[in-house]
Amino acid sequence: MWVGWPATAQRASEESSSSCLKRLTRTSLVCAGLNSVSRLPPPTLYGMATTPLGEFIIAHRDALLLHCEAKVAQRYTPLSGEANGRGLPLFLDDIVVELSGGNRSNTMEMGATATQHGADLFLNGCTVGQVVHDYGSVCQAVTDLAVKSAIIISPEDFRVLNRCLDDGIAFAVAEYSRQQRLIVAEESRMYSMRLRSLIEAAITGFEVLQTGKIGVGGTTGALVYRSLTELRAILALPPAAAIAVS
């Protein structure tokens, strides 16, 4: 798993996972308590049925996606790529594959899905917290619909779901951070090029003035002055601001 998340992503991920597990555990314990303490007949007689999570996701895929979209829309404009099978729709499909295998055989495919989603969210101007909460909306959609449908999902399926969410968040946040580093590197490169250009202009102009053939008060002198003035203005700014204006 990728480590070293930004602090905001770490906190958001922990809150999302904790909330998900509490909701899932509460549902399971209530159902289990009714059956064991009261010695009542199986939950199915009371409208409660045990359903494999993979089958549940397949049967309610559209409803789950609508729930996720509603949550996402509260934070930012949903991505156009979602409708084309990218992002959360594909992530749900990856969860189904993972549940059917019961192992990490689908981790790389899921990682690719989450990586693309992290990049899409970054390019859409989302925050890293919104990246994490996207996956939290999947957990909330599953638990809300499970409670509403009065079904029980096994603890093992819950563990697989939590593992998928954990992996998805890790890959998505890692890609989001990588995109940030690429932007900073490009901005730094442009900043260096701008400084180099101003220095070269000032030196070249000064060398021309040194010949004595052109007066300091002419166009060349103005070029030297303008280049040095802009250099001074850029260097007087904090590093981040200087890179932004260059």
Image (cartoon, helix red, strand yellow):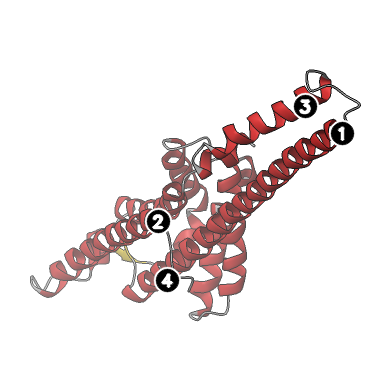
Give the distance between the C-alpha atoms of the residues marked 1 and 3, in whole angstroms: 11 Å
**Residue picked out by circle 1:** 208
Give the distance between the C-alpha atoms of the residues marked 4 and 1, in whole angstroms: 68 Å
Q: Residue furthest top?
A: 217
**Residue picked out by circle 4:** 163
Front position in the image: 69 or 238: 238
Ranked by sequence position, the earlier of labels 1 and 2 is 2
x 59%, y 50%: residue? 184
Under circle 2, the secondary element is helix
Q: Is residue 139 left or right of residue 199?
A: left
Under circle 4, the secondary element is helix
x%, y% of residue 168?
49, 63
Which circle, 1 or 3, is nearer the viewer? 1
Under circle 1, the secondary element is helix
Crowdedness near tag 2: few (<14), some (14–19) or many (≥20) residues, C-alpha within 10 Å:
many
Ranked by sequence position, the earlier of labels 4 and 3 is 4
x%, y% of residue 41?
18, 71
Q: Is residue 180 left or right of residue 218?
A: left
Amino acid at the residue labelled 2: Ala
Amino acid at the residue labelled 1: Val
Under circle 3, the secondary element is helix
The answer, for residue 117, to whether it is visible in the render is no
